Amino acid sequence: MRIWFRLLLLQASWNFERLQGIGFFYALLPGLKKLYKKDELLHVSKSYVGYFNTHPYLAPLVAGAVLKLEEERAAKPGDANIAIDEFKEMVAAPYAAIGDALFWGGLRPLVAGVALFFAVKGILWAPLVFLVLFNLTPMWFRISFYLRGYRQGLKSVEFIQRHNLPDWAIHTKEAAVVVLGGLSAFLVFTHLNTHQLPSWLGLLTLLPMILLSLVARKGLSTLLLIILTSICILCVGLFWADMAELLKI
Amino acid sequence: MITVDLLLGALIALVCGLDRVAILQFMISRPIVAAPLTGMVLGDPLSGLQIGLLVELLWLARLPVGAAVPPDDTQVAIASSVLVINLGPVLDAGGIELILLSLLITIPLGKVGQFFDHYARQYNVRLSKQVELAFEKGSLAMAEWQHLRGLVSFSFAAVATYAVILVGGLIVVPLIWPLLHQPLSYSSDWLALALPLVGIAVILGTINVSRAITLFCASFGMAFLLMWLV
């Protein structure tokens, strides 16, 4: 239990040299203290402060499995088959890639898109909708995967492979694109309605959006796109105001 | 009571800034949460909600993968909310124009967050050395403590970013408000529409899904036609 709570502080000392290394040692220490005595504890602890980096929501799975392996190693000292460092190295990077794609690349835009529907309507519950919808999945991962890792040890890798998480990441991203498409349509339609402009004009929005997405794909920064778009809109606004004034004259 | 508002903003900046990387990752650091939270604490949740709506999608495509540090949209959202709520009565201004002007000033300043975040992560390298030292002395408690010390540098990064964005906004917004107030009134609604759409376009361009544009167009078209015809 203490290890799980400590994993919430995993990245408190994140640094460019060892990334989450010290955090992983900090999280596991209560478990290690129960398994080893003084000098041995110090020796084992040292092996955990090196380089370590994975996704924070999947770190409990690694921690659970490592704890299980440590228990096995403490029960059978000198067993060369229990290679904890190799296990850590083997799973950390792939889990990081899976987590980044699933949570940051897929789930976050998907849930943000849903919550923004509420925000556009001025519903003050929008932040709560975002927090609840987003945290459901990571919390489930954090709790159940920690237990799964502890129960299965090395076999937890097979569990991840069986569930095809990379495929889920792709499906989540596709769902995010669909939701963001609906959100864009909703924003444009509401705007045109407010200004009593013909609705068919909204379909033209697709053109600049596709253009912007292609430019973004080429690597142009978001900040530059925002500045350029804002300047264009401000200039068109000024021009339009001048024209309206001239026509009145 | 501007000072109290600025300090309350700093407190929110600290908590949300830590959630961003160092602890929890419950996503209270996302603009859609942080800005309305600031607005609620300072007495104007609707302005916060509008700011959250405009900022949320802008840098969502920049993933915090490995050592990559995206611009600090959390502090942009919090500082903009504090600016709008406090400068509104002073400038006798309000509404979407002031929100947009504040954002146009604070969004570029979000890059400062990358600098401070880099600095914090670089500073924390020293903690690794301290942990080694603690092991040499045989003190696990000291090694544990080094980990928690990392929170200090992330806290500093969050509050410093908030302060720079806020001070920048407090200086620049009142200066250029008289100049840009009129032009903004002509185009504010279009600009408010454009900001989230630019964010969505950037996500679309970088999301790494095959046929993303086709999916997006189909979804956009279907939703638009439904709203139009029903």
Image (cartoon, rainbow, N blue to C red):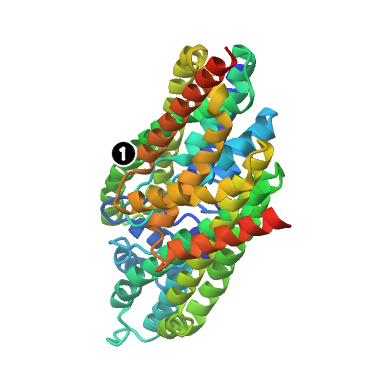
Residue A41 in view (yes/no):
yes
Q: Nearer the viewer, residue B96 or B55?
A: B96
Q: If the image is split into quadrants, where does the C terminus of chain A sit?
A: top right
| Residue for point 43% across, 74% down | A166
Q: Nearer the viewer, residue A34 or A56?
A: A56
Residue B83 in view (yes/no):
no
* Residue B7 found in image quarter: top right
Badge 1: residue crowd in 10 Å (few <14, some 14–19, many ≥20): some
Q: Chain of mark 1?
A: B
Q: If the image is split into quadrants, where does the N terminus of chain A sit?
A: bottom right
- Above or below residue A211? Residue A143 is below
Coordinates of residue B17 in the picture (x, y in percent): 48, 41
Q: Nearer the viewer, residue A132 or A77?
A: A132
Q: Nearer the viewer, residue A244 or B161?
A: A244
Q: Amino acid at mark 1?
A: Tyr
Coordinates of residue B53 in the picture (x, y in percent): 58, 42
* Residue A195 found in image quarter: top right
Coordinates of residue B58 in the picture (x, y in percent): 46, 44
Would residue B34 be found to the left or right of residue A160 on screen?
right
Coordinates of residue B101 in the picture (x, y in percent): 51, 25
Residue bearing mark 1: B119
Q: How many marks?
A: 1
Under circle 1, the secondary element is helix
Would residue A162 be found to the left or right of residue B84 on screen?
left
- Above or below residue B27? Residue B172 is above
| Residue for point 51% across, 16% down | B177
